[in-house]
Image (spheres, rainbow, N blue to C red):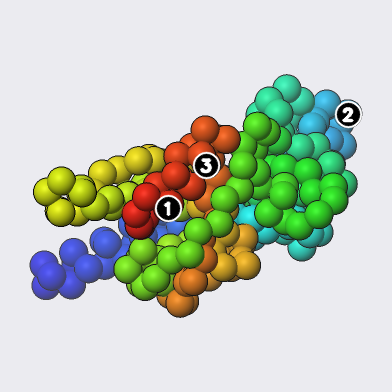
C-alpha cells in the first residue's frame, strides 16, 4: 500500500514539474510576443542552430535568430545572419550558443586554413607517425607540445626535451575542420606558431628528431 502510494506521489510530482516547465516556457514566449506587439523595444541576435565545429565555414543552416529584450544581447554578438555567414569558426561552437565576433575569422581569399592563422603567426606543417599523431585522435583545435631528441656526441646518448609548448593544431593532413571525432591515420600536422618558434622547430629537425 505504502509503496503504491509513494509511486503515485512521484508520478504526480513529475507531472506537475513538467506542467510547470511547459507553463513557464509558454509564459516567456507570450511575454516576448506581447512585448513586440505592444511596441516594446527588442534586439535580434544570431545563435547557433546546430553545432559548428572548429574550422567550419559558416553557412545559413548553422544560424538562427533569437529575439531578446532591448539591451540584453551580449556585447560583440552578431545581430544579422549576413554578418557571420561565410566566416570560419576559430573555436567549437555548440548549438544554442550566442555567436561572438572574437570566435570567427573572415574567409576572404585562399584556403580555410589561411583564415585560421592568427595575425603575426605562422602555419608550419610537420610529418608525423602513428605515435606522434596520437593514434589518429589528434584533431584541429587541439593543443600540443613539441619534443626534440638530439644525440649527445660526447656520451653517445639521446637527450629529449620539450622545445615548444601549447601550440594550436590548425589542421591534420589537409583537414582544418572537425566534422567528427573518428580516429584517422595522420601523416602531417599543421601547427600555429610565432616566427621565432618556427625557427626553433626547423633547427631541432636539422639536429635530431621531433615529436
Residues at marks 2 and 1 touching, judged by CB atoms closer than 8 Å: no
**Circle 2 is placed at which residue position?**
39
The residues tagged by marks 2 and 1 sit, at their Cα atoms, a distance apart of 66 Å
First along the sequence among labels 3 and 2 = 2
Name the residue furthest front.
154
**Point 71% across, 28% down: residue:** 76
> Dividing the picture into quarters, in which one does residue 95 lie?
bottom right
Name the residue furthest top.
71
**Circle 3 is placed at which residue position?**
198
Quadrant of the frame with the N terminus: bottom left
Mark 2 or 1: in front is 1
Residue 205, disc: 1
**Point 76% across, 57% down: residue:** 111
Answer with left or right where residue 108 lies relative to residue 2. Answer: right
Q: Residue 12 in the image: state x and y as whole percent.
A: 34, 61
Mark 3 or 2: in front is 3
Q: Residue 200 in the image: state x and y as whole percent.
A: 45, 39
The residues tagged by marks 3 and 2 sit, at their Cα atoms, a distance apart of 57 Å
- Given residues 189 and 63, the one toward you in this image is 189
Answer with left or right where residue 167 lies relative to residue 84. Answer: left
Amino acid at each position: 500500500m505504502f509503496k503504491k502510494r509513494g509511486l503515485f506521489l512521484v508520478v504526480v510530482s513529475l507531472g506537475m514539474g513538467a506542467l510547470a516547465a511547459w507553463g513557464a516556457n509558454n509564459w516567456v514566449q507570450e511575454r516576448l510576443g506581447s512585448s513586440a506587439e505592444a511596441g516594446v523595444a527588442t534586439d535580434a541576435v544570431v545563435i547557433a542552430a546546430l553545432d559548428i565545429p572548429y574550422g567550419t565555414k559558416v553557412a545559413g543552416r548553422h544560424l538562427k535568430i533569437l529575439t531578446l529584450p532591448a539591451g540584453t544581447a551580449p556585447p560583440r554578438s552578431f545581430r544579422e545572419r549576413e554578418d557571420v555567414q561565410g566566416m570560419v569558426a576559430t573555436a567549437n561552437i555548440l548549438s544554442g550558443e550566442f555567436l561572438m565576433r572574437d570566435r570567427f575569422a573572415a574567409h576572404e581569399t585562399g584556403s580555410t586554413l589561411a583564415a585560421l592563422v592568427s595575425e603575426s603567426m605562422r602555419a608550419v606543417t610537420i610529418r608525423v607517425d602513428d605515435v606522434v599523431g596520437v593514434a589518429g585522435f589528434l584533431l584541429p583545435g587541439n593543443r600540443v607540445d613539441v619534443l626534440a631528441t638530439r644525440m649527445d656526441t660526447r656520451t653517445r646518448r639521446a637527450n629529449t626535451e620539450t622545445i615548444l609548448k601549447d601550440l594550436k593544431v590548425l589542421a591534420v593532413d589537409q583537414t582544418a575542420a572537425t566534422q567528427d571525432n573518428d580516429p584517422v591515420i595522420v601523416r602531417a600536422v599543421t601547427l600555429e606558431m610565432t616566427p621565432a618558434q618556427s625557427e626553433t622547430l626547423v633547427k631541432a629537425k636539422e639536429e635530431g628528431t621531433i615529436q
